[in-house]
Image (spheres, grey):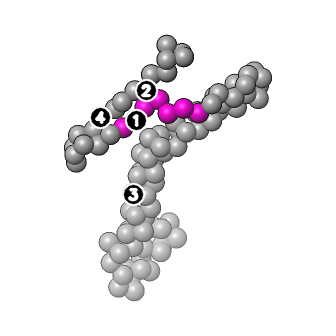
Amino acid sequence: MSRQHELTALKTAGVSLYRVSLPILLLAFGVSVGAGRVPETLIPVLNSKGEEVDRIKIRGELPRPQRRTQIWYRSSESRFFRVDLLDPADR
């Protein structure tokens, strides 16, 4: 913004430098939050879908039935229990 003298024009008009920098800071904050959330939420889902496509479409294997193998139980605000399910047929 200083290359085209936009900051000088905004200061002359009485606009605060903090007011000018607010959209830039909000955009930077949004990008940093997004960069932190993508590896936590989106990448595991995409990896499992990619493995499924590789197994079914490329290798020609049959699709596996979807089973829940883990159950998460919340007993209080800060206490969680993970229960792994066992399949007697698969031992």
Label 1 and label 3: CA atoms lie apart by 34 Å
Looking at the image, is mark 3 or mark 2 nearer the viewer?
Answer: 2
Ranked by sequence position, the earlier of labels 4 and 3 is: 3
Which of the numbered marks, if any, corresponds to residue 29?
3
Q: Which residue is mark 1?
A: 71
Q: Residue at x 40, y 35 (%)?
A: 71
Disc 2 crowd rating (10 Å Cα; few below 14, some 14-19, many 20+) is few
The amino acid beneath tag 4 is Phe
Image coords of residue 58 (percent x, y): 77, 25
Farthest residue toward the front?
Answer: 88
Q: In the rendered image, which quarter is residue 46 located in?
A: top right
Label 3 and label 2: CA atoms lie apart by 41 Å
What is the span of residues highlighted in magenta in the rendered image?
66-72
Q: Which residue is mark 4?
A: 81
Against 77, residue 25 (above or below) is below
Ranked by sequence position, the earlier of labels 3 and 2 is: 3
Secondary structure beneath dot 1 equals: strand
Name the residue nearer the viewer: 25 or 65: 65
Looking at the image, is mark 4 or mark 3 nearer the viewer?
Answer: 4
Label 2 and label 4: CA atoms lie apart by 13 Å
Secondary structure beneath dot 4 equals: strand
Q: Is residue 65 left or right of residue 43?
A: right
The amino acid beneath tag 3 is Phe
The amino acid beneath tag 1 is Ile
Looking at the image, is mark 2 or mark 4 nearer the viewer?
Answer: 2
Q: Are marks 1 and 3 in contact (CB under 8 Å)?
A: no
Q: In the rendered image, which quarter is residue 57 located in?
A: top right
Q: Which residue is mark 2?
A: 85
Q: Are marks 2 and 1 in contact (CB under 8 Å)?
A: yes
Q: Are marks 3 and 2 in contact (CB under 8 Å)?
A: no
